[in-house]
Amino acid sequence: MISSPIRWSILCLAPLLLVGATAGVRFTVDPGQTSAESASQAEKRGKEQTLKVQYLEIVTPQVNETCAALARAHGVVFGEAVAALGNARTAKLKDGGRIGVRAPMRATEQPVVRPYILVDDIEAAVKAAKAAGAEIALPPMEIPDHGTFSIYILGGIEHGLWKL
């Protein structure tokens, strides 16, 4: 069993490593292409395909403690809870995205760190995820004034998609 201080460190550091590793990254999907075709075309163009984390969601029963740790470590400011985002407290990311920390919304919801990748066409991205074997946990759903999001599960990992 992992000790509490180590578990806390992992919880705080994992999303920050993810954000740092994906800064300035954007993901696009052409609905008529397979991933192999898309990769091949990118290679032909000589351009690297990129991803952008638009929203990084942390679900934890220790919302205030997590926000305080991230604020102290990185000098960010978390706002008050945003009802439209499941009462998440959010802070801005350097590239224009946001990080949100919220409590579980139901008794069965487990703590999770879920990156939402920015996409141009969320319907096509959901279709591509499903074609790759993903379970669509939440089909595209609009959040007024925030965009449209979707969640899928692949390989036991929860992934999010976000369209502005």
Image (tube, rainbow, N blue to C red):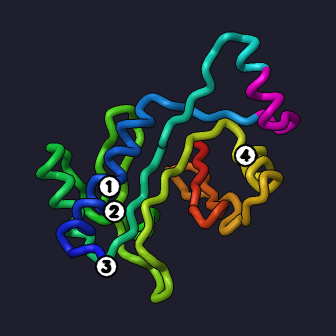
Q: Nearer the viewer, mark 4 or mark 3?
A: 3
| Mark positioned earlier in the residue sequence (3 or 2) | 3
Residue 160 image point, x, y percent: 57, 55
Q: Nearer the viewer, residue 32 or 2?
A: 2
| Mark positioned earlier in the residue sequence (4 or 3) | 3
Q: Are marks 4 and 2 in contact (CB under 8 Å)?
A: no
Q: Is residue 72 left or right of residue 4?
A: left
The residue at which mark 4 appears reads as: 125
Residue 19 image point, x, y percent: 38, 42
What numbered label is drawn on residue 90?
1
Mark 1 to mark 2 CA distance (whole Å): 6 Å
Q: Nearer the viewer, mark 1 or mark 2?
A: 2
Q: Which residue is farthest right?
A: 32
Q: Which residues are magenta?
A: 30-40
Instruction: Note whether 62 is above or below 136 in the view shown.
Output: below
Q: Are marks 1 and 2 in contact (CB under 8 Å)?
A: yes
The residue at which mark 3 appears reads as: 1
| Residue ID at (16%, 60%) | 68
Mark 4 to mark 1 CA distance (whole Å): 25 Å
